Image (tube, helix red, strand yellow):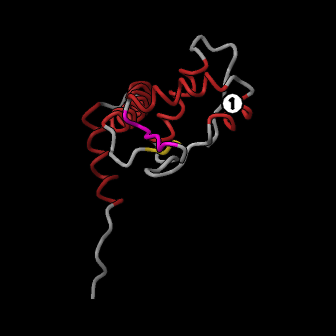
Amino acid sequence: MHIHISQSDKLPIYAQIVSQVKFLVASGRLTPGEELPPIRVLADRLRITPNTVARAYRELELAGLVTKRRTAGTYVSNAGSPLARRERLRILAERVDALLAEARQLDISISEVIELLHRRDEAMQPHPKEV
């Protein structure tokens, strides 16, 4: 699990951890049942206090993204969190915004973009082999 902490970020450090773990779960880089690093290990790696990591893990547990197993660690929740779906949709929305902005710059209408999406989706569908 790769997390980067920025001291210049306006978000508190624990919130940066929460945000990045949410992204990792939503993007599938952290999978259900996968163990997160122990609090002390992550704190040492990030050079922060264990209390900060513990707070982030508590926030993630309250959000339903992770579960704690007493003395056995913290794991990505097996229950597909609605938060993870919302995060995936948010990521996709950012890409759609960029696509629409580029289409406007290229003077391509929304109906042409939608038609292109349909064509590309169809082209990406698996086709059964003909016998």
Q: Looking at the rendering, which quadrant does residue 13 occupy?
A: top right
Answer with left or right where residue 96 lies relative to residue 58: left
* Rendered location of residue 62, percent (x, y): 39, 28
Is residue 54 shown in magenta? Answer: no
Q: Dot 1: what SS?
A: helix
State the residue at coordinates (62%, 34%): 39
- Relative to 32, is 129 on the left or the right? left
> Residue at (51%, 46%) from the top-left corner?
30
Instruction: Answer above or below: position of 56 versus 70.
Output: above
Residue 92 percent location from the top left of the image: 39, 36
Residue 86: where, in percent of width, then height?
A: 33, 33
Q: Is residue 51 above or below residue 3?
A: above
Q: Residues within 10 Å of mark 1 (few under 14, many from 20)?
A: some
Q: How many marks?
A: 1
Asked whether, in this view, residue 130 is left or right of residue 16, the answer is left
Residue bearing the label numbered 1: 43
Residue interval drawn in magenta = 64-70
The x and y percentages for residue 100 are 38, 29
Is 69 magenta? The answer is yes
Residue 89: quarter of image? top left
Quadrant of image for the C terminus: bottom left
- Amino acid residing under circle 1: Ala
